[in-house]
Image (cartoon, rainbow, N blue to C red):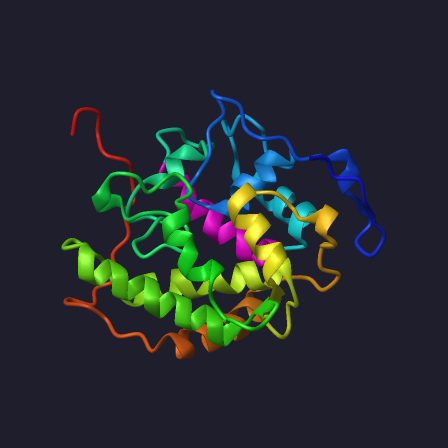
Amino acid sequence: MAATAVLADSGVDLSANPWKAPGPNDLRSPCPGLNTLANHGFLPRDGRNISVPMIVQAGLKGYNMQSDILIGASKVGLLTSREAQTMSLEDIALHGNIEHDASLSRGDWFFGDNLHFNETIFTTLANANPGSDVYNTTSAGQVMHARLADSLERNPNITNTDLQLQIRSVESAFYLSVMGDVIRGEAPKKFVQVFFREERLPIEEGWKRSSVPITVDTLVVVADKIAEASDWEPTGRNCAEIVLAPPKDGN
C-alpha cells in the first residue's frame, strides 16, 4: 500500500513517505510506533544506525509528537545498544529497559519472543470496547488490566512495578493520541488496528496526522486516566529498576 495523501493541516507530505513492508534483513522493534516510522521511511528502513535526533525528527514529522517526549525516551532506548550514539530497532527488545511484560501486542520475554507482533496477545485490545467504533481511556485501562492479569497468571518471572505501570500507561496514551484525539484520548478502532497489525499509518482509511502537538503534558493527562481505569496494583517488590546496558557477549 502507498500513502497518497498530503496533510495540509500539518504541512507534512506523507506521499513522500509511502509504506513499505520490511525486507528479510531489515530490523524492527517491539514498538509499533517506531516500526511504523521505519516502514514509512521517517526512520531508516533497515532499522539500523538510528540516533536520538533521528527519532525526534521522525516522531515530529510522522506523528506531530514533540521533542519533550522523544528525547528522554530515545536516550533511555540508546542504553540498549553497544554503540555510543546509535541503536538498531531490534536493540530495543532488551528486556527491562523500555520493553516490558504484559505488552499489548507482544509476548512476554519469559516465553521466548518479545519482539514480533502476536495476534493472540493483540486480541485483547482488538476486541475491547464492544459495541463502539472507538477505543478510549476506559477501554485502554481495561485492556491493560486484562493483559497484566494474563501475564501474572502465566509468567512466573513477571516484573510489575510503578515503572512498568507508567510505561504501559504512556504507551496506551500514545496509540490513542497518535491515532485519534489528543485531548479526549479516543481513537477509531480501524486506525488502531491497522497501526498495530500492519505497522502502517492508516491514511487510506482516513487517518490524518494530528494538528494538535502531542506533548508530555497531553500524554500525561490521558495516561493518568488510563492508569486509573486499569485498577493496577504492584506485584511483589515494587522497586523501579531499569536495565542500563545490553548483556556482555556470551552471558
- Asked whether residue 173 is in view, the answer is yes
Q: Nearer the viewer, residue 80 or 132?
A: 132
Q: Nearer the viewer, residue 20 or 9?
A: 20
Residue 84 image point, x, y percent:
41, 31
Residue 242 placement, left or right of 197: left
Residue 6 location, quadrant: top right
Residue 162 location, quadrant: bottom left
Specify whether residue 77 is painted magenta.
yes
- Asked whether residue 171 is in view, the answer is no
Task: Classify 119 as above or below 167.
Answer: above
Query: At x 30% / y 39%, what residue is drawn?
Result: 113
Please state, as top left, top right, bottom left or bottom right, where the C terminus lies in the image.
top left
Task: Classify 64 as above or below 245.
Answer: below
Specify whether residue 241 is painted magenta.
no
Residue 125 placement, left or right of 216: left
Residue 141 image point, x, y percent:
42, 72
Query: At x 57% / y 63%, what residue is drawn?
Result: 176
Q: Report the predominant secondary structure element of the magenta stretch.
A: helix
Query: At x 81% / y 44%, what residue is drawn?
Result: 5
Please state, as top left, top right, bottom left or bottom right, where the N terminus lies in the image.
top right
Query: At x 56% / y 42%, what residue is drawn?
Result: 198
Task: Classify 79 as above or below 206.
Answer: above
Residue 73 placement, left or right of 110: right
Residue 131 location, quadrant: bottom right
Residue 188 image point, x, y percent:
63, 63
Q: Which region is colored magenta?
A: 67-80
Residue 99 image point, x, y percent:
35, 48
Task: Classify 88 as above or below 195.
Answer: above
